[in-house]
Amino acid sequence: MMRELRRRRVFLAVGIFFDNGRWGSSLLYRWVDDFLWTSCVLVGDVESNGTADFNANVRINDNTRIGLEAAIVFDSEHYELFGGDLLQRRVMAYIS
């Protein structure tokens, strides 16, 4: 039988949020234990990893907010699934 298929997946997620009506921000951290990924022909180990995401925004008026969002702040290269893309830091600015 495939190695450790019955193993329980362990994860931790914590976050801190701030919003005073004009300014808003958040910092989120997620850690996932290593696990065996199986999907059709793709089978393999995904190593444990931790990622931190950050968001900051400001309200310009009742209808407009501008902000900056950074995913994988510490640029820890990792896979989310076996056979998938190698993820790295991503930073985006937005207006909504």
Image: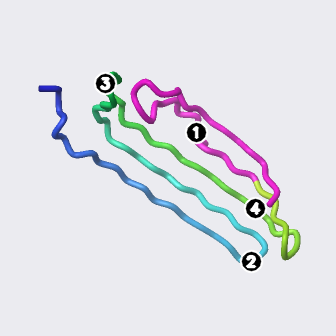
The amino acid type, in three-letter code, at marker 3 is Val
Labelled disc at residue 74: 1
The kind of secondary structure element at disc 1 is loop
Task: State the quadrant of the C terminus.
Answer: bottom right
Who comes first in sequence, dot 4 or dot 2?
2
According to the image, label 2 marks what residue?
21
Q: Which residues are magenta?
A: 68-96
According to the image, label 3 marks what residue?
43
According to the image, label 4 marks what residue?
57
Who comes first in sequence, dot 2 or dot 1?
2
Q: In this picture, is 18 found above or below 40?
A: below
User: Badge 1: how crowded within 10 Å, few (<14), some, or many (20+)?
Assistant: few
Q: In this picture, is 6 found above or below 25?
A: above
The kind of secondary structure element at disc 2 is loop
The kind of secondary structure element at disc 3 is strand
In the rendered image, residue 40, in percent from the top left (x then y), is placed at 32, 27
Q: Residue at x 17, y 26 (%)?
A: 2
Q: Magenta segment: does it hold 91?
A: yes
In the rendered image, residue 57, in percent from the top left (x then y), is placed at 75, 61
Question: Which color mode does the image show?
Answer: rainbow
Mark 4 in CB contact with mark 1 (< 8 angstroms): no
